[in-house]
Image: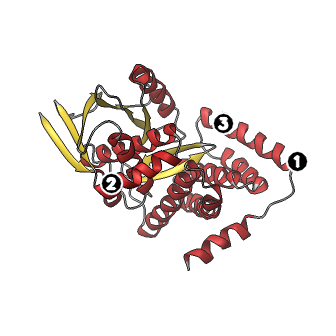
Amino acid sequence: MDLLRCRIEEISDWHPNLFLEPHIVACASILSGYSNSPARIEIDWEMVKNKPENFELRASWCRTTADKGRRFRATVQPHVLVEMASVALAMVLVHEVLALGPLDVTVLGEKADYRCLQSKQVVEISGTENLAEFGRRHTEKVKQALANPFNWAACVVVCGFSKSGHRIRISQHEIGD
Amino acid sequence: MAKTKSLPKEVQALVAEKSSILSKALAFAELDMSATARPLWAAAGFKEEMLAPLMETLGRDDEAAVHRMSAASCFMRIGDWSRAANLFRAALGGPITSKSRQEVHRLLKECLAALAKSPITTTSNVASTFSASQN
């Protein structure tokens, strides 16, 4: 079993162009609602080239972040926390496993698009606390990602948080898939 | 996965600065801190607007169009409908996908409808608030 250990706070250093502090706090807030640090997260790879086999992520967070997370939970809507936490975990994988390099962010209407600056690929991220919805959410996000304004390939990361165990499904798609 | 040609250093720096500002605006907006996000939307919008023709000088017309759409979306967030409408209109002149074209037409229509109903807003005041807070 390949094991990737990371401190969730590290994503700020890995993605210096992006403001990720609230996402880090949201991630600690969501994960600490289920277990102590570190949290085990299973990864499903779909259509990812050179994917690692039997890979597990162990994400940890420090006490200060957990304290901020508790305050966040009291003031921020749950679905916003889940989406932000998912961005934080996606940022771990795109840096540590897929090595996508620096990301740019643009907006179209209400929707934010992350895209790689080194390869023609956008990154679509989402999350849910309802595992029954996990697969459908992933399918929906693949469709949305492939409709990106660049007409580029897409990397889709969907996080599922639950008592029975956390999961991330990560997939890469070419236009026309 | 196809590689992209790397951007000149000055443009890379501008993209990085814009992403930093825009990701802050997005985060504050998600956290319902719209007053904090407002000057950030304006500042990000201006950077996106600057990036669009720079991308054209590099032969990256598709990216130029995306930066114009993004600039327009930033200005929409602060109710600068006329600036947003101009940028959406300009983006339609670029090589964008049919799905994006549909979305831009929808957003342009939304801007024009809002413009018809509201007094004219100038973004420059909002952006200067951001610049002053950075100094």
Q: How many marks?
A: 3
**Residue pictured at 37% horizontal, 54% vertical:** A67
> In the rendered structure, which amino acid carries the disc numbered 2?
Ile
Answer yes or no: are tags 3 and 2 on the same subunit: no
Residue under label 2, please give it. Answer: A11
Q: How is the image coloured?
A: secondary structure
In the drawing, does residue A68 fall left or right of residue B113?
left
**Closest to the observer, A9 or A135:** A9
**Closest to the observer, A61 or B115:** A61
The CA span between labels 1 and 2 is 44 Å
- Residue A129 position, x and y percent, is 41, 30
In the drawing, does residue A104 fall left or right of residue A171?
right
- Residue B114 position, x and y percent, is 82, 46
Neighbourhood count class around disc 2 (C-alpha, 10 Å): few under 14, some 14–19, many 20 upward: many
Which quadrant is the C terminus of chain A positioned in?
top left
Return the chain for callout 3. B
The CA span between labels 1 and 3 is 20 Å
> In the rendered structure, which amino acid carries the disc numbered 1?
Ala
In the drawing, does residue A43 fall left or right of residue B90?
left
Looking at the rendering, which quadrant does residue B125 occupy? bottom right
User: Which disc is residue B116 wearing?
Assistant: 1
User: Which disc is residue B128 wearing?
Assistant: none
Q: Is residue A72 positioned above or below A161 on the image? A: below
Residue extending farthest to the left is: A1
> In the rendered structure, which amino acid carries the disc numbered 3?
Glu
**Residue pictured at 32% horizontal, 45% vertical:** A94
Q: Secondary structure at mark 1?
A: helix
Which quadrant is the N terminus of chain A positioned in?
top left
Residue under label 3, please give it. Answer: B103
Q: Is residue B41 positioned above or below A163 on the image? A: below
**Closest to the observer, A162 or B129:** A162
Return the chain for callout 1. B
